[in-house]
Amino acid sequence: MKGTKSVALVTQPGEFFKEEISRAIRKYKVSIDPNTEFYLVDLLTRFMISENFFTVDEKGAKRTETLAFLLGDALQAEDHEKKKEDLRRLGDISLYTAGFFGDSLQRKTVDVDYYIGMGKNAYSNLSKISLDSYFRTVFTQLSEGFTKFVDVLGEVSSSTLLTDTKSILRSYDLWLKTGSERAESQLKEAGIIPNKRIKTSVQ
């Protein structure tokens, strides 16, 4: 099965991601507009190409963009289209990072809830300045259901169950901070019933 998915991912990424996102949406019973679902498929397809996710500095080295800088660029942009472009990139990078790398973010200074906050605000602002009704609907839904869509992308990024203690603790931290249904499901699959009275932190 894993080999089959890998081939599909290389040859037909759009169809692969559509299938995987639809599966995750059904699993978490997420209410989603078809246009928003298409946007998520397009986002994953775009970020398959590393040049679309990273920026390249003057030495040709790839690096991730700092969310605060992206936000600053968006706020300072005088051109309306440039502002929308910067806000969209901020929202997309925040959503993709929180969804695909949420587990590793639990070990970093900048936590997953920072990405969630930045992404929600970016999409919310976009929904207010977008003149196109298609994008207003999409960005409104992405903002209001951001955490659920993080779960959806997280499900796509990993089909394995928890296998070690640190993974369990990281999922517990994620559930405590965001209420992630995916993290809760992983904990239950590992035989753990989440309890917010118990606090934990992973170094």
Image (cartoon, grey):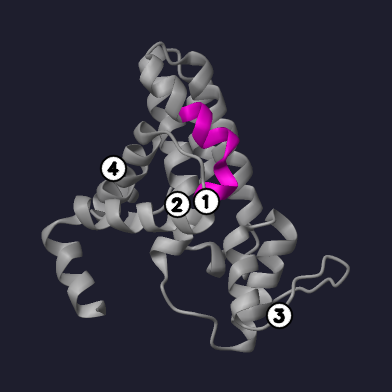
- Callout 3: helix, strand or loop? loop
Image: 158 above or below 119: below
For the question of whether residue 189 can be seen, the reply is yes
Please tell me whether the stretch drawn in magenta is mainly helix, strand or loop.
Answer: helix
In the picture, which quadrant includes the N terminus?
bottom left
Dot placed on the residue nearer the N-terminal end, 1 or 3:
1
Rounded to the nearest angstrom, the CA distance separating label 1 from label 2 is: 6 Å
* Residue 145 quadrant: top right
Element type at marker 2? Answer: helix
Residues at marks 4 and 2, CA–CA distance in whole angstroms = 16 Å
Q: Which of marks 4 and 2 is nearer the N terminus?
A: 2
Residue 79 visible here: no
Residue placed under numbered mark 4 in the picture: 42
Q: Mark 1 points at which residue?
A: 29
Q: Which class describes the residues within 10 Å of circle 3: few (<14), some (14-19), or many (20+)?
A: few
Reply above or below: 35 against 29: above
- Amino acid on which disc 1 is placed: Lys
Q: Marks 1 and 3, how far apart in space?
A: 22 Å
Label drawn at residue 192: 3
**Viewer-closest of 164 and 188:** 188
Secondary structure at numbered mark 4: helix
* 182 over 73 or under it: above or below: below
